[in-house]
Amino acid sequence: MNRLVLAVSFLLLPAAGALAQTYSVKDYGALADGKTLATAAIQKAIDACNRGGGGTVEVPAGTYLVGTIALKTNVNLHLGSGAVLRGSPNVEDYLAYTLPVYGRNHYGILYTANAANVALTGHGTIDGNNGVFYDFDQAKKLDTATTRYTRQRNNFRHVAEGIGDGPVVPKDRPRQMVIFSQCVNVRVTDVSLLNSPFWTLHFADCDAVNVDGIRLWTNLLVPNADGIDVTSSRNVTIENCDIRAGDDALAITGYDHHFEIPGFTGVRHACENINVSNCNLQSYSSGIRIGFLDQNTVRNVNVSNCNITNSTRGIGIFLRDEGSLENLTFTNIRIETKLRTGDWWGNGEPIHISAVRGKENVRLGHIRNITFTNVSCQAENGILLYGSAESALEDITFNNLKLELMDSPLNDVAGGNVDLRGALVPKTSLFARDIPAFLAEHVNGLTINDFKLDWVHPRATFLTHGIEANHFQHLRIAHFTGTGAPTNPAARPVVLRDGTAAAVDRRPADVQRTRVRKH
């Protein structure tokens, strides 16, 4: 804690001295005509500011066409009201890089590495110009290998005409629009980040980061256009943000590398102490994603007072690799999720937690100590907790949970499936399954306290029980108000199988127990 306080204090110190100096990009030859490439002129202003000991680089109103720009230590890039940094439509205007296997690619608009006390502020805009980097008349197709085990098989998420929910097909495009790599004391406030062709705002191996009051919007049809990505970073605060992203709105991961994406490699420490509050999130993937192919542990994440709307998944917590996901809390969260057409991961789950093997020859990590308090969901699929024999979920708690399970107009083409993509075994990656409102597989230490379930106009026959738990230890269900699906005469309020130590405060007739041991 002392380290964080000192870091934040240090960030504020230069404001009284070095950062009082102002450098206008127009004084260095930047033209705001939206046609003339202004990259070199803006970089000259940043370099001069850095050499002078730091200060503010002012971008006045107007549209500046840019390729790749690099911030430097003690520099605040301030976008004035009406100022727009628009990404060039020519990918060759962006700085190129080459990685083994993946070949040649390009950085995005703002690439900042190994800097301290840097800021991006103001009420101006960075516009990634993604319309030129995608074919918006064509949607990515699901292959038959992916849909083989679904309920609908070749008709899974089929669209009769048009592109449906996308995702649209990319062309050659620059990577992260704004990235801070191995930086200390970073502040991003008030700006608008729009139309990114790839991840929008990325913090990789950073320490002491504050993001406050930004507007981050990308076209919801655009794949890989994440909102904010926090990768193997520490002491990060994200608050008062409005994020609408085609891919994950907020992704918190422990990657030490990730395919061809630049800015981090060989990072071997935890991603930790992440606080998110008062944000509005939308995504055609996950509103909030934690984990996936993580080589490092992610821990101590606190999310509060957030709305997740119009999303394919609400909160997704995924383990497919070594490293663990632990000490995560979610408080006062509202979630709205829907089924989609097209090749988006997720299938309408408001909350998804899964730990299944995604890589060979690694020791699979663990998901443990996750708490949800005051969470209200309106969803077109149930809540999914899905551990595995080699990595059971541990100590998952829900307090004051509400779920309205809605009928979906896409049930015929998308409903009745579980999406665990990233799993190593294809038949356990995306597959047909009857859907309870709350499914728990391989969970040790599950507490569900004060859960109100409503089925809203259900029609699908694949809907089943209120709560279903299989292969569990130490399960407690208290104050559960809900039934099985009205469309299924065999559905029960609670079904328990192959577990140990279950305490359920419903009448015995409401609870079906099969091979459940007392101790």
Image: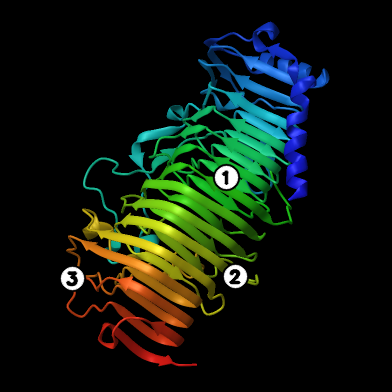
Residue 339 appears in which quarter of the rendering? bottom left
Q: Dot 1 corresponds to which residue?
A: 229
Front residue of 86 and 438: 438
Residue 67 location (% of width, % of height)? 60, 23
Q: CA distance from mark 1 to mark 3?
A: 41 Å
Q: Reading the chain from its start, which is encountered first: label 3 or label 2? A: 2
Question: What secondary structure is marked by label 2?
Answer: loop
Q: Secondary structure at mark 3?
A: loop
Q: Is residue 41 left or right of residue 311?
A: right
Could you classify mark 1 by the number of other residues whose Cα lies within 10 Å: few (under 14), some (14-19), or many (20 or more)?
Answer: many
Question: Given the image, on which type of amino acid does mark 1 rest?
Answer: Asp
Identify residue for label 2: 366
Q: Amino acid at mark 2?
A: His
Q: Check disc 2: other Cα within 10 Å, few if <14, some if 14-19, many if 20+.
A: many
The residue pinned by badge 3 equals 486
SS at badge 1: strand
- The relative height of residue 197 versus residue 25 in the rendered view (above or below) is below
Residue visible at 66% across and 54% down in the picture: 272
Name the residue rendered at 17%, 78% in the picture.
489
Q: Position of residue 508 (x, y in %)?
A: 29, 88
The residue closer to the viewer here, 28 or 499, is 499
Alpha-carbon span between mark 2 and mark 1: 22 Å
Q: Label 3 is placed on what type of residue?
A: Pro
Q: Which residue is at 48% across, 26% downward?
A: 129
